[in-house]
Structure formats: structure tokens, C-alpha cells
Image (cartoon, rainbow, N blue to C red):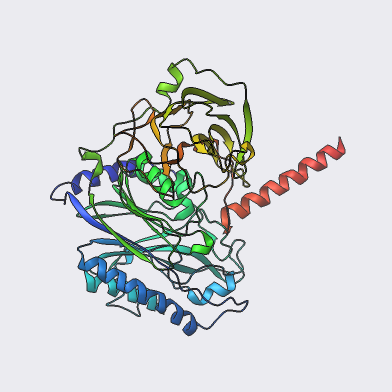
Amino acid sequence: MIPSSFQASVAVFAQIILHVSALDTFRAAVYEHAVILPNNTETPVSQDDALLLMNKNMDILEKAIKQAAEQGAQIIVTPEDAIYGWKFTRETIFPYLEYIPDPQVNWIPCQQPHRFGHTPVQVRLSCLAKNNSIYVLANIGDKKPCNSRGSTCPPSGYYQYNTNVVYDTQGKLVARYHKYHLYSEPQFDVPEKPEVVTFNTTFGRFGIFTCFDILFHDPAVTLVKDFQVDTVLFPTAWMNVLPLLTAIEFHSAWAMGMGVNLLVANTHHVSLRMTGSGIYAPHSPKVYYYDKETELGKLLLAEVDSHPRISPTYPTAVNWSAYATTIKPFPVQKHTFGGFISRDEFNFTELFENAGNLTVCQKELCCHLSYRMLGKEENEVYVLGAFTGLHGRRRSEYWQVCTLVKCKSTNLTTCGQPVETALTRFEMFSLSGTFGTEYVFPEVLLTNIHLAPGKFEVLNDGRLVNKNGLSEPILTVSLFGRWYTKDALSISGGTSNAATTYLLIFTSLMIIALQNTVMV
């Protein structure tokens, strides 16, 4: 959803007003939760049994919320699916859903528990926020009645949405967001259009979206660029994918690339590769957590700038292709080869020497690397890779990626495969690319899945460079670009009114075209 210029102007004006008598910093909390999952069943459980499971998870969340408040946190984010888990059908999720009204109704569930029917989860969340004087974001399920005889209404007579709710320190519902970009969530519907949801506090302007939404322009980029939010609240159930899309790696890069605070609460489920939460500022991570060894949850807290754009540490504007398009490309090695990261075919070139200058290109994207290793490990191979095109199985998101990546072994066919440990340290690196997009996210991931706070920076000409001396052993150094205007027209997962209508129209046109072809 692209906001009107009037809406954006109002948002900016409100932001200016908020700066008067506002707090300069605030204490933020996120909680990575090890979800208690329901038993697998093909038939719906009773509403009472559903509530019993949800209360078990909320018992744990309550302890985290109280602990955060006792340590001075003013806002806490809990994960996606944290209250009831995942792996549902439309029918089996239904007992877990509640009707969630528009926040404009001015509702404090803790004080009016029966105003909107059976809403015990919302009542408990509201009371947790009110009794602990803390803003609480939680992810729950919303059900909206519709006319089942209508063309877009599901047979059950309800739309079902993956939903974030926020309660303020009085327990009042101040924000509701329906996730737009679903990922393998057949239990939920896709809203008719992306929702841009913000709310104001004395410590900044906040925006909300969920998990897979972060990879798309709307609502994620719109919130930051047009509505000028200071901080994004981001519940997720993120499955880590090396080498480019681990949670801590990409989320910290997105915060830096967009110039905004990002509060990330991930679910914790080791066997599904779910871990990685953090509080990320535009210049560097404040705190993060990644742990595949424990089955327990984790509370993180940090002091954050309320208005990062006016902070002395706010990064300068970057022209991501300025350096790469003005230099003469480095010599392209004869041995450039193809390889895959996930399902994307990159062009790779090997770092043969301890130091050098390399260029590798794919179509319009050329990636340049200058580097110097402390010493080249004999059993470790690094390559420079370039990819530009529609990503993955869905072929819907257009990526541009320049990456320095460690191969899994000395066999070049393993380059791009997941690897978690490294020994090679770099004294210097400088990575740049001829990007066609302004949306580029800088990633540096170290051995054993660690970030590198304070050890790299982005220059205003688009170079990602190391600083403050020798690096820890590197897994990958990447510039991850998203060229949103080249995305394919598609909506992933779930059921969408608009998507269904579009599919019907498209199918009809194809039938007509085929008929005309046969007639000719």
C-alpha cells in the first residue's frame, strides 16, 4: 500500500510535534520464547483446551514481561506464534482466534473484558501491560465475520488473520496489524491490502510488521520512508538460512540499511533452526542473541535512542553504487564459475592469494573486492560472488547481492552451502557493487554465527569496509540489495481476496488467448 502524500505529510508533522517534551532514550526489551506447541490434530480442539495451551505460554511471557518492567523497560516485543505455535489448518486454528477490534474503539480489555465477546487472551495481555506499566506487543489470531455467500468470504464465514496487537501502559489497545506477506500459513488470509500501522509514545514513533514482511517494500519500507517511524517492532518465527539470511545477520543489516531502530523477538525452536533476536540501532546492534544449544527462552534489554535520525551516531546517507560505478573494474579472473546459494545461481571467483583486488559480474551487477588476509588457511577457500535476479523457488523477489563467502570445503562445488565455522582473519576488506537499487543491507557474519559490532562501517560512496583492526574469522561479508520495483506480481502463502480475484481474471484471459490461438 502506497500512502498518499497527505498521509505522509501528516505523519511527518506529528513526528515534529512528538519531539517536543519527548524522551531522548528509552529502554527496550525483546523476549525469545520457546513456544509450548499444541498436539498435532486434524480436528479442532475445544475453545477451553485452546485457552489452556495459550495460558501456558502466557504464563511464561508474563514472567518475562514482569522481569523486563522491573529492569526499567518501557516496551517489550514477544515473538510471532508465541502464544499458540504453528502447523494449523483453517479449521484447527479457529478455537485459538478472537475478534480484535480497530484500536479507534478506545478499548481497555482489562477494564471491559466482555465488550467484544469472548476475548480472554486480549484481556490478559491488556492487564499485563497495565499492571506492569509497560507497552506490550503480542502476536495472536484475529477472526472477522463475513457473508459466507459472498464471492470472497471463506466457507466458514470468517476471515482469519495473523495479527499483532499493542497495549499501552494503561492496558489500552493502541495498535493492530494484520500480516500481509504470509509464508506457508494456510490457516490465515491475506488482507486486501498492506496495512501501514503506527502509534506514538513519549519516546518515539513506532511501526509494526511481521516476519516475512521485512523482505518486501510494503509495508516495511513505507513505514520508514514515508511515515518516518523511529523504531520498528518486529515479531517473527524466523528459520535461519546460511549464508545470507540468518536472523541476527539480516535483521541487523536491515536496521542499518533503513536507518531505523529494529526490535526483533524470534521464536526459539532449535530443531527448526529458529533462534536469533536482538535490539538493533541504525549504526550497530545494541544486543543480540543466537543460541542453538539451549531449549530455553531469553530476555534482552537495551537503551535505545528515541529519535535516531537526530542522534550524533546516525549514519550519513549512502549512494550504494557511487564508488563501484566510477572505478575501473579490477581484473576479472579467468576461472569464474557458477554456484548456488540456496536456489540462486551466483557467479563466483576464488580468492587465490593472501591479498588482492577482484571483480566478478552477473548481468548488470559488478561486485568489487579489495582484501588482505592475515594468513591464508590451507584448508579454507573464500570466493567473491555476484547475483542479480528473481530469488528462489517463488521467483517473486528481485535480489542484487555481492558477497564474500567461505566455502564449506576446498571443493568449489560447496561454495554457497551453509557453513558455521571459520579460521581465516582479514586485516582489510572493501566490498562494493554497481547496484541498481537504493535499498542495500550490509551484512558481516563471523564464525559460530556472531555479529561484528563496531568492526565495520559503510562509507557514503557505498563501500562496506572493516575498521578497528583485525577481524574475527569471517563467514561472510555481503551487500544484500532488494530491487522492489522489479519484483514479480505475487503474494506468498495464505488466501487473499485480491489474489484470488487476480488469479480468476488471469485464468480467464489465458483461456481466451488459447481459444483465439486455436481459431487462428
**Position above or below: 94 against 196:** below
Is 339 drawn above or below residue 418 in the view shown?
A: above
How many marks do you count on the picture?
0
Q: For this rendering, which residue is in front, 131 or 40?
A: 40
Quick check: 48 left or right of 509? left
Q: Residue at x 59, y 45 (%)?
A: 342
Residue shown at 63% from the left, 47% from the top: 393
Residue drawn at (49%, 49%), measured in percent from left and top?
420
Is residue 396 toward the left or the right of residue 11 in the image?
right
**Residue 363 sits in quarter:** top right
Looking at the image, residue 270 lies above or below residue 39? above
Give the percent coordinates (x, y) of residue 104. 32, 63
Query: Can you name the residue that lies furthest to the front here?
Result: 378
Left or right of residue 400, residue 459 in this image: left
Quarter of the image for the C terminus: give it. Answer: top right
> In the displayed image of the protein, which residue is found farthest to the top?
328
**Outermost residue toward the left in this view:** 21
**Is residue 499 found left or right of 35 in the rendered image?**
right
Whether residue 233 appears in this view of the structure is no
Q: In which image quadrant can residue 294 be found? A: bottom left
| Percent of width and height locating residue 36 | 46, 74
- The percent position of residue 412, horizontal first and vertical second, equals 62, 36
Can residue 274 be seen? yes
Report the front residue among 467 and 281. Answer: 467
Q: Nearer the viewer, residue 424 or 193?
A: 424
**Residue 309 placement (x, y as % from top left):** 25, 40
Q: Residue at the far right: name it.
A: 519
